[in-house]
Amino acid sequence: MADAVSPTAAAEEEKVDGVAEEEVVNPWEVSGKIDYDKLIDKFGCQRLDDSLIDRVRRLTSVPPHVFLRRGVFFAHRDFNDILDAYEKGDKFYLYTGRGPSSEALHLGHLIPFMFTKYLQDAFKVPLVIQLTDDEKCMWKNLTVEESQRLARENAKDIIACGFDVSRTFIFSDFDYVGGAFYKNMVKVAKCVTYNKVVGIFGFTGEDHIGKVSFPPVQAVPSFPSSFPHLFTGKENLRCLIPCAIDQDPYFRMTRDVAPRIGYHKPALIESLFFPALQGENGKMSASDPNSAIYVTDSPKEIKDKINKYAFTGGQDTKEKQRLYGANLEVDIPVKYLSFFLDDDEELEHIKKEYGSGRMLTFDVKKRLIEVLTELVERHRRARAAVTDEMVDAFMAVRPLPNMFN
Amino acid sequence: MGYTKEQLLSRLQELRVDFTKYEHPAVLTVEAQAKYVGDVGSALSKNLFLKDKKQRFYIVSALANTTVDLKVLSQRLGLGKGGVRMAPEEALGEILQVPLGCVTPFAVINESARHVSLLLDQGFKSQKSCIFHPLSNDTSIALSANNLDNFLKSVGRDPSYVDLEANPKVGKDQPPDLAALVPSDSIDLPEISEKAPSSDSSVVKKISADIKPNAVKAKAVKTTDIIKPKDKAAGLQPPASFSDPGQFVEEILDKTSSLLLSEITEESINQHGGNLGVFVSDNVRKRLSSELKNLAIIFKNTAYTEGFHAGTHRQPRRQ
């Protein structure tokens, strides 16, 4: 999947004091301070409210994931229909993916996968993961071999997030496109005019035809008939797609086409963007290693990055801090803790103490460093246990007889 | 454990791979072998076991009278000049699990040779049949290249035939033509003194080159006193906690008991008294549940992968 990447030159607005930047959100570009309420309105999706979260808790009998509780996954399309069907005993499958453009994954990349793992375990449903090596080959001008290699390397980090091999199928486009998958691609392609893709994705006359014909590749994993080795006989199976909200245009197109070719519309559950270390107006970019925490960072690197580069809302001096407290709106350590600190009570406590000035930035950072170090260490260890053979097993076109158990 | 000659031969029979067997006293060189099977109407082979600077290994199997120039081969593999040399004797035992003088394409039946690249002389194809050792120096078998291919495919190998005498130009605009045959994984051996002398290409031409030409020099190379086992290469084996149930359980118990010990303190005893058990048990569950589930999923995935590997490599049922 295209991930939120650095903006094109055209979108780099000058930062004039007091004037909000024009926000841009599409699969290849995210910039500006995002107003999520406006975005939900503009895109036409729904807010994920507390009653839905409650419903999830009742249906799954496990505590809802921290990302649901904290509003990280905050918007959806048709998630209610998925839950209605689930209640009646009709299961669904999950579909998510990654565009393997670099070897180094940072925490922001892990978020959709961490959430998807929770969904897989809580609902006991199968999952397909698409690695769009062809997309990166085209957009990032990588060689075919390099993009395939990156896909396999990224697969290892994805597997390390803890997916169950007996219900997970990982595939790369270069390996898998063909057969029933390709037939669906053609069906989708026939329903989308050139003008429409230009409208959705902003293609120009200079863009090569590979880009223009790519969107169906990312659309068809939403249809169970694309995976005959998994879902033959289950043509009615619904699909739920956890993704970041910038992927919405791809799936709006897919949802538009689905009924015209006789398929269910896929449901979506969408997340906020993970902020860069330097704050909301900063950009997480592969060229700036200090803009994010990477899964390969050592404990020392994590400590240094948080201490040196994390944008804080704390006051300049201890005295001022005690007087005025911190600005939680812009404080990155608190934001990161709200993503990764599981204990609701502890987070509330920290917000209260830090916001009122009784706690210092130093303490908040210290706690964040602990939490992140533990997370990265767990990931590193799980990653070390992933062998090439395990990748082969996850990527083998094989039946998954226990995928709903 | 490496395969024995008997196991290999019975496997060939199961696969209906036709071969003719010749038994003779143990031989270490092609010359010696020729005395016994030189005139049975099949072509003798010479077999080299090579390694490159990045711990990747190769078997080069050629007709006895094909010229094999290691310098040229090295360039064609994209390893530069002098990038390959004869593998040390220890590697023979560790990786191919065959004795000295017994390098053979059949060694790839062994799991330990999984990442060894196999290069076969194109010349084999124009012979009626060719002679190889079936994992033992006291036997030779003759079979056609086709039959050899059938065996190789049955162990998951794609036979790669190469014109070993070709000497194509390798340069900026002419990429090394054999680069695809370089293994993707290196093999870590326990660290030993690597002063194994590389062979001259001239030596290779004449004798069965799996004898190190300086073997006669009575091993000026001695294994060092301290053998430091290297960490296993990541691709080869999962950490023991995840493949050995005993270790897995030990790890769970370690984590649980260390948490218990930290929870049961004077303070908590005073605080909870008789209810300490309930309190600690709840806490342990809350704090360890997700971590232990993560460990369990890795354990499951590892076991599944072992089964997957076994399944994809299993032999067809006997008829």
Image: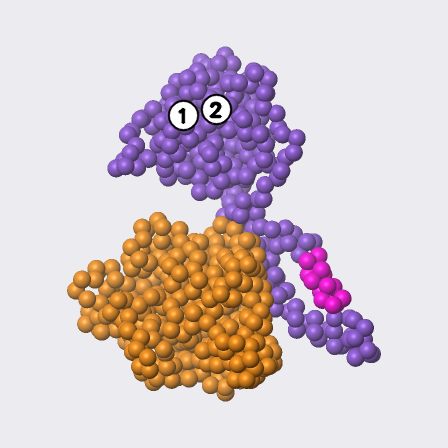
Q: Is residue A173 visible?
A: no
Residue A256 x, y percent position in the rendering: 29, 77
Is residue B255 inside the magenta stretch? yes
Asked if residue A226 lies left or right of residue A168, the reply is left
Residue A33 x, y percent position in the rendering: 36, 77
Indicate the chain on which mark 2 is placed.
B
The residue depicted at 48 percent of the width and 74 percent of the height is A312
Instruction: Give the residues in magenta.
Output: B249-262
Give the orange chain's letter.
A
For the residue labelled by badge 1, is the local secondary structure a helix, a strand or a loop? helix
Asked if residue B274 lies left or right of residue A19, the reply is right
Asked if residue B216 lies left or right of residue B60, the reply is right
User: Does the residue at mark 2 contact the one at mark 1 (Cβ under 8 Å)?
Assistant: yes
Q: Colour of chain B?
A: purple
The residue depicted at 56 percent of the width and 15 percent of the height is B216
Q: Of all residues shown, which one is farthest toward the top?
A: B35
Asked if residue B248 lies left or right of residue B212, the reply is right
Indicate the chain on which mark 1 is placed.
B
Label 2, label 1: how far apart the Cα atoms are: 10 Å
The residue depicted at 60 percent of the width and 51 percent of the height is B239
Is A224 situated above or below B90? below
Residue B70 marker: 1
- Tell me where residue A276 sits by quadrant: bottom left
Quadrant into which the N terminus of chain A falls: bottom left
Is residue A306 inside the magenta stretch? no
For the residue labelled by badge 2, is the local secondary structure a helix, a strand or a loop? loop
